[in-house]
C-alpha cells in the first residue's frame, strides 16, 4: 500500500480532515528517542559489532525518523517490513537480516518488546530477549558478554 493509498483509506474509514502533509507529520511524530538506548547503541558499536534495525514499519514513519533522529542511520543494517512485504514474526523478514548481515543465526541477538517476535527469532536459532526497559537490556548485554560491566 502506498503512502497515498494508506492516507486515502484512512480518510474514507475515519473521516479525517487533515491534508496528506498534516497527516504525515502527525503520524510520524509519535516517536521519541530513548536516550539510554542510544547510549547503549554507541557502546555496542564502539566494540565494532554490527547493529541492525529490524522493524515493522511503513515509509511515512521511516521518513520522519530519518529526518529527525540522526542515530537511526548509524545502524549497520536496516530491514524494514514495508520494503520486504513481510512483518515480524514472519520468518521471511528475519531471513532478510541474516542474508544482509552475513552473520550466522546463532550469533545474532535481537531484542524486541513483543514476545511473539522474540519467540520467532529463537525458533530460527537467534539469541533473543524481550526488551522491558533500557537498564534491564543493558544488564542482559553485560551478562551475554557484549559489554563490559
Image (tube, rainbow, N blue to C red):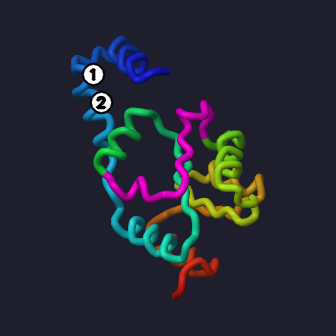
As drawn, the label of residue 20 is: 1
Residue 129: give x, y in percent of width and height: 62, 63
Asked if residue 136 shows in the view, the reply is: no
The image quadrant that residue 93 belongs to is: top right
Q: Is residue 126 left or right of residue 82?
A: right
Q: Are the residues flagged by discs 2 and 1 in contact, CB closer than 8 Å?
A: yes
Badge 1: few (under 14), some or many (20 or more) residues near its Cα, within 10 Å? some
Q: Residue at x 57, y 64 (%)?
A: 50
Residue 66 magenta? no
Residue 138: give x, y in percent of width and height: 50, 75
Residue stretch in magenta: 69-87
Q: Residue at x 35, y 61 (%)?
A: 34
Asked if residue 83 shows in the view, the reply is: yes
Q: Is residue 107 left or right of residue 26?
A: right
Residue at the far top in the pictured view: 12
Q: Residue at x 55, y 34 (%)?
A: 83
Circle 2 is placed at which residue position? 24
Element at label 1: helix
Residue 67: give x, y in percent of width and height: 30, 45
* 85 shown above or below 113: above
Residue 1: give x, y in percent of width and height: 49, 21
Badge 2: few (under 14), some or many (20 or more) residues near its Cα, within 10 Å? some
Amino acid at each position: 500500500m502506498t503512502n497515498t493509498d494508506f492516507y486515502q483509506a484512512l480518510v474514507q474509514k475515519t473521516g479525517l480532515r487533515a491534508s496528506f502533509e498534516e497527516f504525515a507529520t502527525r503520524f510520524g511524530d509519535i516517536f521519541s528517542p530513548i536516550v539510554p538506548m542510544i547510549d547503549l547503541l554507541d557502546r555496542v558499536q564502539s566494540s565494532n559489532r554490527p547493529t541492525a534495525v529490524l522493524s515493522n514499519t511503513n515509509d511515512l514513519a521511516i521518513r520522519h525518523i530519518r529526518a529527525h533522529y540522526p542515530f537511526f542511520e548509524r545502524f549497520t543494517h536496516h530491514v524494514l517490513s514495508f520494503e520486504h512485504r513481510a512483518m515480524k514474526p514472519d520468518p521471511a523478514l528475519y531471513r532478510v537480516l541474516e542474508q544482509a548481515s552475513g552473520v550466522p543465526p546463532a550469533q545474532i541477538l535481537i531484542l524486541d518488546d513483543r514476545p511473539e517476535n522474540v519467540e520467532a527469532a529463537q525458533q530460527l536459532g537467534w539469541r533473543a530477549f524481550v526488551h522491558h526497559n533500557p537498564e534491564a537490556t543493558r544488564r542482559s548485554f553485560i551478562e551475554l558478554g557484549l559489554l563490559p560491566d
